[in-house]
Image: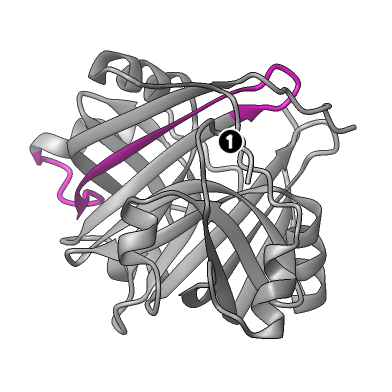
């Protein structure tokens, strides 16, 4: 398999901080009570080493406080062949109360959730570790041309088939990690290529999560889809399904050789869509 030409570089802590401060949409990775990773998109604000976001009662508020979580942001410009990602890991805390606590100032930060509904609860992630990378591909691709709604599984699968960049969440030493990947979705399976590393070492035969999302400001619509399932290494498996998946045109954007194939066989697919508020 051909190597994707280009250049990969590790971002400094200062560059990672600058990117976190210049964006407002990221993804939070949690582990549920069955030790399965979950990914949720959130609007956030980053300052003084803290990722802060607002939420409503639900999964994030139930699972995040007191847990080590991962938070990720990324961007990919196919027209120029440039992309980057930043991963922050740390301890999450419920900072909604008390108002006299040292963290009370965080609740004055300009966090603006795009999703409709009341989000009066605040969660802060005290970042302990931050990493990032940037890559330039020598072969740019051609650019593509206030109600909350739960998406049907058919709608979710259509969206999964329409995109090529997502994020996979895996559990490493009891803590979730998020890693961006280029993928193809085919008949209930998310398939992507990788090299030796964390995804290959900790993904196969484990429960993982996979997420895609998009914000369309022009049409004032946003959506996200999450896949939960089991990851399998299919690099050299000889069954007909694996052989068919390896023939799919998965094209990693990051440079380097990625000879290993991983497939996520979905157990559950869910998604939501909502209208953005008028500005």
Q: How many marks?
A: 1
- In which quadrant is the C terminus drawn? top right
Q: Is 277 placed above or below 262 here?
A: above
Q: Is residue 224 visible?
A: yes
Q: Is 132 placed above or below 228 here?
A: above
Q: Is residue 56 visible?
A: no
Secondary structure found at label 1:
loop
Q: Is 15 placed above or below 152 here?
A: above
Q: Residue at x 55, y 78 (%)?
A: 237
Q: Residue furthest right?
A: 145
Query: 255 or 171: which is nearer to us?
Result: 255
Instruction: Characterize the local packing of mark 1: few (<14), some (14-19) or many (20 or more) Cα atoms within 10 angstroms.
Output: few
Q: x%, y% of residue 128? A: 14, 38
Queried whether the magenta region covers residue 79, the answer comes back as yes
Q: Which residue is mark 1?
A: 3
Query: 140 or 240: which is nearer to us?
Result: 240
Instruction: Tell me where the magenta segment starts and ends, as one range.
Output: 76-101
Corner quadrant of residue 49: top left
Left or right of 101 in this view: 33: right
Q: Residue at x 90, y 32 (%)?
A: 145
Queried whether the magenta region covers residue 11, the answer comes back as no
Q: x%, y% of residue 36? A: 36, 76
Q: Is 4 placed above or below 186 here?
A: above
Query: 271 or 194: which is nearer to us?
Result: 194
Q: x%, y% of residue 169? A: 41, 60
Q: Residue at x 41, y 21 (%)?
A: 19
């Amino acid at each position: 398999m051909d190597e994707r030409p280009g250049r990969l570089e590790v971002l400094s802590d200062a560059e990672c901080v600058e990117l976190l401060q210049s964006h407002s949409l990221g993804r939070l990775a949690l582990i549920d009570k069955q030790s399965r990773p979950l990914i949720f998109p959130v609007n956030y604000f980053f300052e003084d080493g803290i990722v802060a976001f607002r939420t409503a009662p639900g999964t994030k508020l139930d699972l995040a406080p007191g847990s080590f979580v991962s938070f990720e942001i990324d961007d990919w410009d196919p027209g120029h062949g440039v992309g980057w990602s930043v991963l922050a890991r740390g301890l999450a805390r419920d900072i909604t109360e008390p108002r006299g606590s040292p963290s009370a100032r965080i609740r004055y930060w300009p966090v603006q959730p795009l999703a409709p509904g009341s989000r009066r609860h605040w969660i802060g992630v005290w970042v302990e570790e931050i990493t990032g990378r940037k890559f330039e591909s020598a072969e740019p691709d051609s650019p593509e041309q206030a109600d909350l709604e739960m998406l049907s599984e058919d709608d979710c699968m259509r969206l999964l088939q329409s995109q090529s960049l997502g994020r996979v969440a895996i559990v490493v030493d009891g803590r979730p990690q998020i890693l961006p990947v280029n993928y193809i979705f085919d008949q209930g399976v998310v398939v992507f290529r990788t090299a030796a590393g964390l995804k290959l070492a900790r993904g196969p035969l484990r429960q993982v999560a996979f997420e895609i999302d998009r914000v369309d400001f022009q049409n004032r619509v946003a959506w996200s889809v999450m896949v939960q399932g089991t990851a399998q290494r299919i690099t050299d498996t000889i069954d007909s399904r694996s052989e068919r998946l390896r023939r799919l045109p998965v094209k990693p954007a990051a440079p380097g050789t990625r000879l290993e194939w991983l497939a996520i066989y979905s157990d559950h697919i869910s998604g939501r869509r909502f209208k953005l508020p008028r500005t």
